[in-house]
Structures are given as C-alpha cells and as structure tokens.
Image: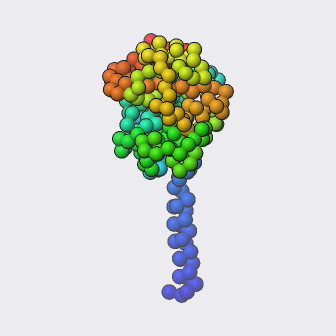
Amino acid sequence: MPAATSGRRTAWWVACLLGAVVSVVVAPAGPVWAARTTTAPTTTVAATVEPRPAVTGHRVIGRSVRGRPIHAWRLGEEGKTRVVLISTMHGNEPHTRDILRSLRDGAPITGIDLWVIPTYNPDGIARRSRRNARGVDLNRNFPHQWVDLDGNYESGRGPASEPETRAVMEFLEEIDPRRVISFHQPLHGVDVDTKEPRFARRLARELRLPRRSLDCGGLCHGTMTMWFNHHFGGSALTVEYGARPSRHRMRVEAPRQVLRVLGARRQRSAA
C-alpha cells in the first residue's frame, strides 16, 4: 500500500476513535447537583438511585480518604428555614442514620428547606470504627480550638487535615443553614449547653431524651458544633441516642418528631 494511502487510512481510524471517546459522557470530578426534575442522570451515582419523592436535590459534597462519596440530599422547599441534619460522623454509631434515610425516602416534606447527610464517615462505617481511614476522629479535626490529641480522639495532622472535614466545612459555608443538628450515640441526651438552649430544650422534649451538658469528657476541641457556632450566625447542637435504639424509634418515631420540632410536615397524597 502506498505510504500516502496508508497515512490517510490511519488518520481516518484515529478520527473515528476520537469521535467515540468524545461521545462518552464523563461525570465531573467536583460537586454535582441532581434535581428531581432532571431527565438524565448527571453522575453514575444518580443513575443507580431509585426515585425518592421527598428529594428535591442531591449533591456529592466530597469524598472520604478511601474515595467513597459523601452524599447530601435536599428535601423540602427553597425559601424556607434551612436546616442540616448530619449522622455517622463516627462510624461505630450507625443507628441514627436511619432517621435521615427515613426522611429522605418518605413522602415529600413541606415547611422547611432541609438537607440530610446520612453518612458523614463512610470509611468508618465500612470499618465499624469511630475514626476515619487515617485513624482520625472527625469530631476533633475542625479548626476551632483544635489541639493535638492522640488515641481514640486522634485529631489529625492539623486542623481540617481530613477530606471529610473539609467537605462538610465547604458545604456548610456555602449553604449557611439556620440550624445544624448532629446525631450521635451512645450518650443518650440532647446538649442544652449550646448557642440556642431554648430550642435544644424543645428538641429534647420532642425526642423524649434527657437534657444534658455534653462536654466530650473534657476533650471538646475541634468539634463540628463548636466550629459552626463560632463562625456562623446559626446554631449547631448535638443529639445523642443510646447504644441500641429500636428500629421503630429510628425509622418511624424520630423522623416524625424531628419534623414537628422543626415546624415541617409530610405532604399528604391526593385522594
């Protein structure tokens, strides 16, 4: 075959291959939104998620040390009071994420602009560990009053050294919620020694949990709630359930109680 003909044929094959590559939709590496009205999935994650009528938006806010996505789901109505619920900052405290999943997977919600992060520490959940994959307690890694702690409360190489911490910080800075409620186990109580004690007392009464002053066993350094309360106009507080709350309480009772105290409700289906 003449060299010129061979060169043209090679160029033609290269063009075909490039066209095939360009036609592939590549999911962007940064945070991605997927609204309920989207006709085509914007990420491979969205393509595998079943329809959820309560969800009005979805975002991957970041990834863990091991590359697992950290999901935030938007429920409710824009323009209403904005609230963020967070669970499983510690991977050995898995039960309260059922509260957030039930809110996400149920009927549409009105009266609030609600975001839920059911699994903050996906590597910890996978390992059944309090800490993330680098052995850091994420609730000691925030930059407000950070100190170098070791052992079970290992605080990391420095303030906000962990990708999970940075993801949540950037998310909260962007959406600037009125309130943040962080769910934990197993200390069984609501922290009323906080920025908005009146609301904390109401929340404790509604959730049927005792009022407590949660001082982290004297190790309250670099916590998410301290950082948020110091840097934002809104308030953040901690809710602690016991070690083994019942499935019914997490999936049925607590979601209803949370909505009531936040002044929100489920939409009733049309008759």
List the single residue furthest toward the bottom.
2
Residue 7: give x, y in percent of width and height.
56, 81
Residue 193: give x, y in percent of width and height.
55, 21
Q: Residue at x 61, y 38 (%)?
A: 144
Vertical comparison of 49 with 98: above or below:
below
Vertical comparison of 58 with 13: above or below:
above
Vertical comparison of 84 with 262: above or below:
below
Vertical comparison of 168 with 249: above or below:
below
Q: Residue at x 54, y 87 (%)?
A: 2
List the single residue furthest toward the front.
218
Residue 48: give x, y in percent of width and height.
42, 41
Residue 1: give x, y in percent of width and height.
50, 86
Q: Residue at x 50, y 35 (%)?
A: 219
Q: Nearer the viewer, residue 184 or 113?
A: 184
Q: Nearer the viewer, residue 70 or 134?
A: 134
Q: Is residue 110 visible?
A: no
Q: Is residue 244 visible?
A: yes
Q: Nearer the viewer, residue 175 or 206?
A: 206
Please, which colouring scheme is shown? rainbow
